[in-house]
Amino acid sequence: MQDEPTPTELIKAVADFLRNEIAPGIKGHNAFKLRVGINALDLVTRQLALEQASDAAEADRLKQLLGSDGALFELNRALCEKIARGEVDLQTPGLTEHLWQTTMDKLAVDQPNYASYKRELGNK
Amino acid sequence: MIEEQLGRCVASWYPGATGVTGAAKLSGGASQETWTFDIVHASGNVGAILRRAPPGYGASPGRAAGLDAEATLMQLAYDAGLPSPRVMHVLTPEDELGRGFIMQRIEGETIARKILRDEQFAKARPLLARQLGRVIAGIHGLPAAKLPKLREMSATKEIADLEREYRSFNWPRPVFELALRWLRERDPGQSQEVTLVHGDFRHGNLIIGPDGVRAVLDWELAHFGDPMEDLGWICVNSWRFGEIDKPVGGFGTREELFAGYEEAGRTVDADRVMFWEVMGTLRWGIMCCGMMQRFRSGPDHSMERAMIGRRSSETEIDLLRLLAPRGG
């Protein structure tokens, strides 16, 4: 068992330091790059917090949709093949809801400030 | 060093030029660079832009029109009275600057967030969609006989290209599969009318001033194809920068864009524009994945490239909003 603090706590401490202490003094292109870097650290902390639950729920939905078992990557690949062959489509019960939920869970990690995501959060 | 070379080059075609000053690189990958500089002249300095592939980089990559074609298109647009820089000089081997061209520098803004939020553009914003409609119509109407050789695309080819690139990533994305399927089922084939298509008509490639659009830049992706492609591409949500209820670049409506286009004597097919908006949304999503691949495998191991990979999910939610809207 690894000791504390957790990865999330460590990354968050670094991101907060960069954001609050370093960023105000940086100008020009490096300020832009620093902002991208801080965004990346924030993304990682969101993923560490959210991934486990959303992956598990996604796998459950995929098993239901496909009627088969497997690792998440393989389940997604199987769904892709079925969509490509036209065996499932937006008329298939559960598919639309599954794609929406999976996509919302990705945006919650990747870009929670994206305007389309914020609109859809209030639009369930 | 580049100032010396540019100085010699400019002296050979600009009467009275005594050199150049203030040369600075604006952007550049390995194969293509953009420089800004001033031509020094007794009657006042003249702003100029160099766009070039440095010596040693001859051929242009895959889809690119090539710098010679870009220069020709830009000059044709200028001659037709469209907002475009004047091409001042096409590089020759004697210039020893590589391939490319020098054009007039046009002052203004290309950064979307400033164009959409800054006070100085407040009067321009409500005019832009209609203006751009007229400009796109002008591009589609450039004299066919004078156009350079360019690749010919169709919806069918574009779908196949996108699918090939997506499959090469070997990363399953059910929303992209759905979009590919949707596009294949509605593929209109080659359009009845094939015209010049700019291919990348969007924020970043448009110089905007307080008075409206001043220049169309970056003809790298120009080709022959369905004219509705340009109208669809500028409506892609990724170019709205948060102003998601204003489909044209975050500043205007489709109706305004279409009205401007039709004022110039051309016809809009709104369904095909929507088809190309879906294609464009998928295309940007696949381009984001491609940048992630270049981060992982290639020379550009930067945070920016890596993080763009995490923007492909933005196009997934936009595709769902287009193809499977939840209503409300």
Image (cartoon, coloured by chain):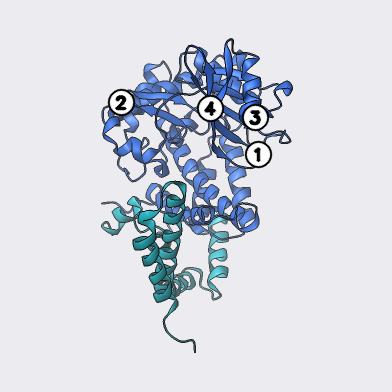
Chain colours: A cyan, B blue
Residue that appears at 30% across and 42% down: B245
The chain under label 3 reads B
Residue B37: which numbered mark, if any?
4
Residue B164 percent coordinates (x, y) = 63, 48
Q: Is residue A27 above or below residue B52?
A: below
Question: Which amino acid type is shown beneath numbered disc 3?
Answer: Gly
Q: If you read the primary sequence from the N terminus, does the residue marked by circle 3 or circle 1 appear first?
A: 1
Q: Nearer the viewer, residue B181 or B120?
A: B120
Report whether B55 appears left or right of B129: right
User: Label 4, label 3: how many angstroms apart (C-alpha)?
Assistant: 22 Å
Task: Tell me the crowding category of disc 1: few under 14, some 14 to 19, or many 20 or more residues within 10 angstroms, Cα based.
Answer: some
Q: If you read the primary sequence from the N terminus, does the residue marked by circle 2 or circle 1 appear first?
A: 1
Whether the residues at callouts 4 and 1 have beta carbons within 8 Å, the answer is no
Question: Which amino acid type is shown beneath numbered disc 1?
Answer: Ser
Report whether A13 appears left or right of B64: left
The chain under label 1 reads B
The chain under label 2 reads B
Q: If you read the primary sequence from the N terminus, does the residue marked by circle 4 or circle 1 appear first?
A: 1
Write down the residue under mark 3: B66
Write down the residue under mark 2: B127
Residue that appears at 32% across and 29% down: B255
Q: Nearer the viewer, residue B138 or A39?
A: A39
Q: Nearer the viewer, residue B286 or B255?
A: B286
User: Label 3, label 1: how many angstroms apart (C-alpha)?
Assistant: 11 Å
**Dot 2 lies on which element?**
helix
Residue B31: which numbered mark, if any?
1
Residue A36 percent coordinates (x, y) = 44, 55
User: Label 2, label 4: how many angstroms apart (C-alpha)?
Assistant: 31 Å
